[in-house]
């Protein structure tokens, strides 16, 4: 049996085609339904990659590393589309958005999914850069969707910083080509991952070093690592909440994935410097900085945006530490963070919709006014804080213990950062979820299913990680070296 | 012939760096826009020359994009924008011209020292081009940080991007240069449309980005 499309192509082309279709669908309810359906199809295509592995070569290449990222990407993309359908219907009711801007929103959502899936699946460094650029553009447009002064400012800041970031990443990409060109010859092979990794040992190490610095600055900006994080809290706070979920849960992962790919190249070259310390430094800075910044936040979406910076820091630290255990922990943490953080943004969407405000001070006593929502939120925050029995605890524990084994001093710094942010989370969740409810107490009419699903997966992974998944992650961790 | 090839591409790439320096000390927006247009025209020539020397006709597409869009259309739009916003008379730079030029010279010295050493084994065309390209990129960043005005920052970004196109064409036989320059053109078009549509002037009453800081949602 031959399919007209292999699953990898389908993962990119389904959302791309849907984006074009959604631009011409005038009814927002139909648009939302198409959005959910297309996201489900894309998820199915991504899962099919486990069964039918397309031949490597050409523009797309599937290996064990990017399959993990693509599955997380499409899964969260699907659940967010369900959440988005309910969220958007409310925005229409209160007149915050028009049907025209919604048509645009749905098309952009699918376009963003297509760009991210292409960035993850492509075998060509240049194509990866182009798709990250388009993903940036799309999210800038989404952040500015409300057209308020704050939203425009956030979008502009994101635009300028993101553009400079991807410009630097392009310079790094060109330098990698120049390093490869004398060894593998001119043309497309010198931009193909599979070829690059095979020949990386013979590249000029000096050129690779400089290239990596540029790539780290460029894609590091997209990943929101301190000190390149300035755009991230604003963009999260001012855009529509489903976009905050996608930004935190998915786009940051894509940037980390890009850095990992180039890190593999450097690891394969004996003369190049070890990128680990650079990643670890930026990671620790992010954890510490975000941990302290959490205390001063008054806006709930901004609060969780800083928490995302912290978790990107943990992931960068884990990958910088290297070795099978830390890489395994980094991968697991990335998956767990994606699911938990997007789940938290879903519940934040419910809250801001009920209370009509994003100020932390305006939201109190959720567990007594909205027991289901309140307790889901408490559990999700407990998960993101790294408390047992959730999956984030497992991954953070592994990061910390492997850090103590190799770099005990840095591990102390990491633990301090984690405790600082744990304190901030406990403090905030206390006022948000407990005490006397204030403001509107009307029930939330949006579905709780996506949140429950994410929480169940994170809880399940914390209690019992199936051997097949653990084995897969371990295999990928060894690939990362 | 080969020495003529080299000298011409060297001259054009050097011209780009020179224009970046000229940009650094422009204190009014219209002259900044003119300098940028001139730099883009030189970039178009440099790319066209590379297309000729490398026998890579597809690079001509990039040259045409640079010539049409960045040397003509965008400067015209920006000039109209600047005039309609009434900000064509003044431009404030953050630092003085002297320190800025000194910083610029140091950045060029840095990129020469870094790239010429790192690319010792590459061929001479690519070496010179990539060193000049990095200079243009860094000077573009310097233009961005020394302007407080949104239009000035956008011009700094576009000149940075000119450096990237130079780097892309200088790397022999690099695929996707055309695609990348198209993607960049879309990005730039969006930036310009962004200033245009969002009417930062109307929304914020000024295009001075320092004023935008006041609207940070977290200050209360």
Image (cartoon, coloured by chain):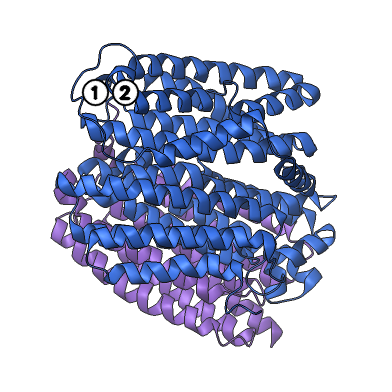
Chain colours: A blue, B purple
Label 2 packing within 10 angstroms: few (<14), some (14-19), many (20+): some
Disc assigned to residue B104: none
Q: What element carries label 1?
A: loop
Q: Position of residue A264 (x, y in %)?
A: 74, 51
Residue drawn 35% across and 63% down? A34
Write the residue at 36% across / 42% down: A235
Left or right of residue A355: residue A49? right
Residue at screen point 29% across, 55% down? B151
Describe residue B15's horizontal placement relative to residue A106 as left or right.
Answer: right
Task: Tally the marks.
Answer: 2
Q: Distance between the residues labelled 2 and 1?
A: 8 Å
Of residues B108 and A480, which is closer to you in this image?
A480
Q: In terms of secondary structure, where does tag 2 sit?
A: loop
Q: Which of A319 and A74 is in front in this view?
A: A74
- Above-or-below relation of B144 to B34: above
Q: Which chain carries label 2?
A: A
Say which quadrant the N terminus of chain A sits in. bottom right
Q: Where is residue A312 in the image (x, y as percent from the top left)?
A: 56, 36
Residue A49, image x, y percentages: 64, 62
Q: Name the residue under label 2.
A: A298
Q: Which chain carries label 1?
A: B
Circle 2 or circle 1, nearest the eye: 2
Question: Mark 2 touching mark 1, by CB under 8 A?
Answer: yes
Residue B25 can be seen in this image: no
Q: Is residue A105 something that shows in the picture?
A: yes
Q: In this view, does A377 lie to the left or right of B217?
A: right
Query: Which residue is pictured at 30% across the width and 35% down the height?
Result: A350
Q: Where is residue A23 in the image (x, y as percent from the top left)?
A: 30, 68
Quickly name the residue at label 1: B220
């Amino acid at each position: 049996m031959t399919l007209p499309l292999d699953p990898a192509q389908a993962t990119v082309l389904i959302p791309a085609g849907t984006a074009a279709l959604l631009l011409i669908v005038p009814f927002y309810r139909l648009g939302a339904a198409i959005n959910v359906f297309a996201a489900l199809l894309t998820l199915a295509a991504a899962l099919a990659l486990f069964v039918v592995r397309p031949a490597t070569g050409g523009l797309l290449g599937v290996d064990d590393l990017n399959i993990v990222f693509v599955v997380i990407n499409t899964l969260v993309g699907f659940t967010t589309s369900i959440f988005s359908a309910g969220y958007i219907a409310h925005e229409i009711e209160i007149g915050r958005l028009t049907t025209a801007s919604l048509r645009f929103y749905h098309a952009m959502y699918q376009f963003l999914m297509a760009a991210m899936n292409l960035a993850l699946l492509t075998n060509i460094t240049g194509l990866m850069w182009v798709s990250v650029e388009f993903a940036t553009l799309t999210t800038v447009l989404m952040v500015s969707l409300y057209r308020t002064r704050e939203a425009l400012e956030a979008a502009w800041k994101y635009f300028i910083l993101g553009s400079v970031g991807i410009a630097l990443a392009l310079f790094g990409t060109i330098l990698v080509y120049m390093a490869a060109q004398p060894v593998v010859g001119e043309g497309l092979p010198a931009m193909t991952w599979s070829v690059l990794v095979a020949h990386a040992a013979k590249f000029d190490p000096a050129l690779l070093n400089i290239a990596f610095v540029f790539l780290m600055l460029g894609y590091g900006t997209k990943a929101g690592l301190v000190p390149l994080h300035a755009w991230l809290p604003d963009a999260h706070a001012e855009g529509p909440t489903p976009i905050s979920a996608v930004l935190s849960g998915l786009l940051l992962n894509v940037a980390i994935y890009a850095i990992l790919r180039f890190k593999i190249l450097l690891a394969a070259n004996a003369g190049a410097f070890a990128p680990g310390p650079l990643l670890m430094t930026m990671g620790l800075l992010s954890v510490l900085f975000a941990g302290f910044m959490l205390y001063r936040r008054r806006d709930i979406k901004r609060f969780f945006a800083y928490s995302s910076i912290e978790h990107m820091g943990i992931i960068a630290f884990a990958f910088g530490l290297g070795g099978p255990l830390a890489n395994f922990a980094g991968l697991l943490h990335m998956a767990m963070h994606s699911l938990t953080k997007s789940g938290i943004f879903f519940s934040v969407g419910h809250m801001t919709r009920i209370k009509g405000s994003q100020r932390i001070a305006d939201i109190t006593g959720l567990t007594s006014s909205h027991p289901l929502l309140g307790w889901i939120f408490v559990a999700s925050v407990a998960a993101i804080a790294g408390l047992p029995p959730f999956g984030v605890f497992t991954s953070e524990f592994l990061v910390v213990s492997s850090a103590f084994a190799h770099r005990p001093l840095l591990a102390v710094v990491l633990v301090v950062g984690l405790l600082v942010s744990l304190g901030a989370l406990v403090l905030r969740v206390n006022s948000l979820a407990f005490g006397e409810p204030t403001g509107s107490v009307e029930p939330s009419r949006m579905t709780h299913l996506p949140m429950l699903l994410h929480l169940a997966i994170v809880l399940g992974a914390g209690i019992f990680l199936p051997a097949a998944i653990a084995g897969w992650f371990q295999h990928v961790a060894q690939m990362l070296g | 012939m080969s020495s003529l090839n080299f000298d011409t591409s060297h001259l054009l790439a050097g011209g780009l760096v020179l224009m970046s320096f000229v940009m650094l000390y422009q204190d009014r927006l219209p002259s900044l826009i003119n300098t940028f247009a001139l730099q883009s025209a030189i970039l178009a020539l440099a790319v066209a020359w590379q297309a000729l020397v490398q026998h890579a006709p597809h690079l001509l597409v990039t040259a045409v994009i640079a010539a049409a869009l960045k040397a003509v259309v965008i400067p015209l739009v920006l000039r109209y924008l600047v005039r309609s916003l009434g900000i064509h008379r003044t431009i404030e730079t953050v630092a003085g011209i002297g320190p800025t030029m000194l910083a610029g010279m140091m950045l060029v010295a840095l990129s020469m020292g870094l790239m010429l050493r790192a690319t010792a084994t590459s061929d001479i065309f690519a070496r010179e081009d990539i060193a000049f390209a990095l200079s243009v990129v860094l000077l573009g960043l310097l233009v961005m940080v020394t302007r407080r005005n949104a239009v000035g920052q956008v011009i700094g970004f576009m000149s940075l991007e000119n450096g990237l196109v130079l780097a892309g064409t200088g790397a022999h036989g690099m695929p996707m240069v055309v695609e990348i320059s198209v993607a960049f053109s879309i990005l730039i078009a969006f930036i310009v449309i962004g200033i245009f549509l969002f009417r930062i002037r109307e929304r914020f009453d000024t295009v001075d980005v320092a004023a935008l800081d006041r609207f940070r949602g977290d200050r209360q």
